[in-house]
Image: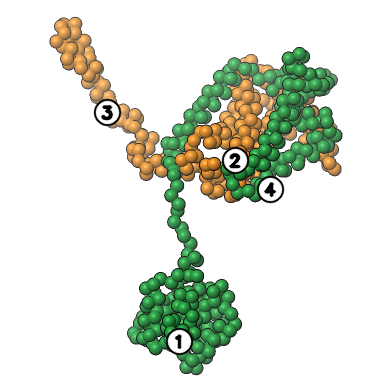
Amino acid sequence: MANGNGNGTNGKGGGALAKVSTALDKTDEKVRGSQAWNSIFRPGSVYRRGYTDSPRNRSYVIMNNVLYHLHPVKVKRHAVKVSYTLCLGGLSFFLFILLTVTGIFLMFFYRPTAASAWNDIKTLETAVTFGSLVRNMHRWTAHLMVLTVFLHMCRVFYHGAYKAPREFNWVIGVILLTLTLLLSFTGYLLPWDQLALWAVTVGTNMMGYTPVFGSSVKFVLLGSKEIGNDTLLRWYVLHVLLFPFVIVIFMAVHFWRVRKDGGISGPL
Amino acid sequence: MAEVPEHLLKRSQERRKALGLPTGEEGGEAATPTAEATPAPDAGGGAGAGDITPPATGGGSSGDGGAGDSGNGGGDTGGVPAHLLERSKKRKAALAGGDAGAATAASGGGGTATAVAAPPTPGATGPGGHTQRLLTVVKSGSIQQTRAEAQDKVHTWPHLVVIEFASMLILLAGATIFSALVRAPLLGLADFNKTPNPSKAPWYFLGLQELLTMFHPMVAGVTIPGIGLGLLAVAPYIDKNPSVKPTDRKFAIAIFSIFIMMWAVLVIIGSFFRGPGFNFVFPWNDGIFFEL
């Protein structure tokens, strides 16, 4: 395109082509030079004063963004090695976000009653756009999250990262693992199919053997003597509201402590 | 012992000579100037490293009294022994020529950690026309060394953020593709009259269900997981070994690995090797009785 003028020597056909070409070039120049174009496509235009790569701007990106601001401006060099963390903690967090997003989508189509729960899911799978995909994602990523949280714990143990000054953050981590299991388990009942019902029956029967207040624990969990409508509502609220609420608080403490305890643990 | 900077010692000695006081070298009461001139916890000793200001103003209580002490009052450990206090009192009485008020004030303030001098009265000067004096010389060890150790660091943006972003995208892509291909199970409507055989808990609880075949439910379902989780939570308080090198913590790694392996084996047996009636089966003979 840029050498359109040079084509003029090739003959008449070439001349016409060259004319079009120069016209295009001119338009191109005009458009790219226009204020509108520059205000939209200017590199770094999301930043009011543009973005140039400098240590100062690299710091500002982190400091001036509420999400990135979870991170310090600088991290230890070894901390960004994928082979050290395998991204497990971060991915667990990302899976939590993914589960929240897909979960909210599912909530639009689900009623936690014994009469409608199963049908709602059947309808979601067959009649809702992307319904099946989102439900599958919610289920598979939930299993994956249990796995990543568990593996994250193993990683932390093998690196000795629970040692001083990070002892308490390890305790928070164990609580988070427990909450993850509880979140997964409470969600297990919600489809209200045979798998859900009997898996939860097995689980809650076990909890019923808690010493001294076994039967009370079971009653509180089930909302009645047997699994039923009340259980479903109860576990639904636990699953979509209470446990996410609690886990977010503990996650906040977990992330905050990572930074307060001096970033992630040092190299071995 | 604390190091008093050379120039301060020198100045102190010059002043002492000028005032006709015994200097450290001549023996006298002060053992060595280095040893005596320093500790901060005691107001008298701390303030008395250098110059002597006569207790001219009544308001200058502890600081002034301390200045008169000329660096003799400081105990090495901070607490001033009684005999030194006694000596300091005598010395002050001698210097102040009977200004007993200042002396008592000094002994009263001896235990406090203040080294605050009275603000110099405008126009009032000390002996030799001095308007300044050395308040205290602080032990070198008591100064916090705040010099940061140089660490090998990189900018979070872009080095860390780009990795996080890439790993999220990969995970998201993987999850989407997997979910598009593999359907999540949805069995028939829950039916209380039809117990599936076998009935299994979610996979992460299958280790517990496996334990149920060996122990009383209270042990398998509550005691063992409770103790396990409890031990896990207090692990950092049990393992006091500060080293993170794998070679230094063979025992901890071994214990943890056994714990994890045992759990994994129980989950795998519960998932794939348990068939109808929760009896042991081989999945290659009888098929897999497992739903996620």
Residue A182's x, y, as percent? 70, 35
Position of the C terminus of chain A, as image quadrant, is top right
For mark 1, does the 10 Å Cα neighbourhood hold few (<14), some (14 to 19), or many (20 or more) residues? many
Residue B88's x, y, as percent? 52, 85
Q: Secondary structure at mark 1?
A: loop
Residue B69 visible in the picture: no
The three-letter amino acid code for the residue at tag 3 is Ser
Q: Residue at x 58, y 84 (%)?
A: B83
Q: Secondary structure at mark 3?
A: loop
Subunit that carries the residue with mark 2: B
Judging by colour alone, the chain drawn in orange in this rendered image is A
Q: Which mark is residue B238?
A: 4
Subunit that carries the residue with mark 4: B
Q: Residue at x 77, y 35 (%)?
A: A221
Count of numbered circles in the view? 4
Residue highlighted by disc 1: B55
Find chain B in the image and tell me its colour: green
Residue highlighted by disc 3: A34
Q: What is the quadrant of residue B155 in the picture?
A: top left
